[in-house]
Amino acid sequence: MQEVKITQNEAGQRLDKFLLKYFKAASPGFIYKMLRKKNIVLNGKKSAGKEKLSAGDSVKIFMTDETISKFRGESAMTPLKSTALDIVYEDDNVLIVNKPSGMLSQKADKIDISLNEYIISYLVETGKITEEQLKTFRPSICNRLDRNTSGLIVAGKSLKGLQVMSEMFKERTMDKYYITVVRGKIHEKIKIKGFLTKNENTNKVIILQKPKTDSRYIETEYEPLACGSNITVLKVKLITGRTHQIRAHLASVGHPIIGDYKYGDKKVNTFYKDKYKIKNQMLHSWKLVFPKMQEGFEKLSNREISAKLPEEFKTLFHSKNIKVKI
């Protein structure tokens, strides 16, 4: 027999949903059979599975350790070096990290190691979550950046943190700013609008001036911070947040991002790679501005969180004698 004590992270969900997470290799039919036979009981009583869990509830599992291990279907977690994380902010509910370019935000394949895995490893290593707790709740990132885009990613350490932060990104209740370097000279602040449609086969988006059936409205605001020889450093405010929005939107108005091989200028990219060792797209998720926050998140109320620029940016600015104040 094993007993699982429900924590705040598992509270609020139905028992059957909890059990399907706990027993990842089990079918719903198996779970309901175990409940009917009282091999799984809630607070010592037979349960239908529809009950809402509360912190402190007891779930007892009357099975052999071998059976439990089989239906959990989990292997031991491979520890990763948490020194790979550049932590910008942390509290009980939220972790904000400066992701380096080249790292995946989330897994694309089972064999991938992404920022999510580094975050979980860090939380286990520092004792902020246990491997036992990971069986029913996994901290996760709330926003994504392209592999070759650097900058701020927000993760929920607790269920509440995950829910609140994910909702904020969905409803766009925080302001998001990027720093980027583009081809050409820009001298004034501009807000551009359009419609975006994605080709799933090529994983590439197209910017339209008029809507189509499968298109989505986009809005991007950018402001020049400094100019060099035929390049401009921009501060970009992401008003809507669509796939590849900044990259494709800027390219559509004649100002592709330096180092962007999907939407950019191949000749320009080759020049900057050869002369300045620019290997990644010069796009950095720089700053988040939070509104007044609800109870439990007061430390983030009306606060600005920013991430330092990658060395590639600093090297390029120094080489071209570009003065950027941010």
Image (cartoon, helix red, strand yellow):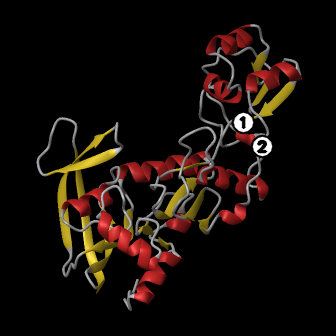
Query: In the image, what residue occupies the spot 77% across and 25% down?
Result: 43
Amino acid type, label 2: Glu
Of 191 and 300, nearer the camera is: 191
Q: Amino acid at mark 1?
A: Lys
Decide if residue 267 is on the left or right side of residue 108. left
Q: For this view, does 263 lie left or right of residue 123?
A: left
Tell me if label 2 and label 1 are in contact, CB under 8 Å. Answer: yes
Image coords of residue 232 (percent x, y): 29, 79
Helix, strand or loop at label 2? It is: loop
Q: Marks 2 and 1, how far apart in space?
A: 7 Å
Q: Position of residue 81 (x, y in %)?
A: 74, 60
- Can you tell which mark lies on residue 131? 2
Question: Which residue does the image show at 30% across and 57% down from the upper left?
Answer: 263
Residue 185 figure quarter:
bottom left
Left/right of residue 51 with respect to residue 226 in the rendered view: right
x then y, percent, for residue 306: 48, 73
Q: Secondary structure under badge 1?
A: helix
Q: Which residue is mark 1?
A: 135
Question: Label 2 crowding class (10 Å Cα cut-off): few <14, some 14-19, many 20+?
Answer: some
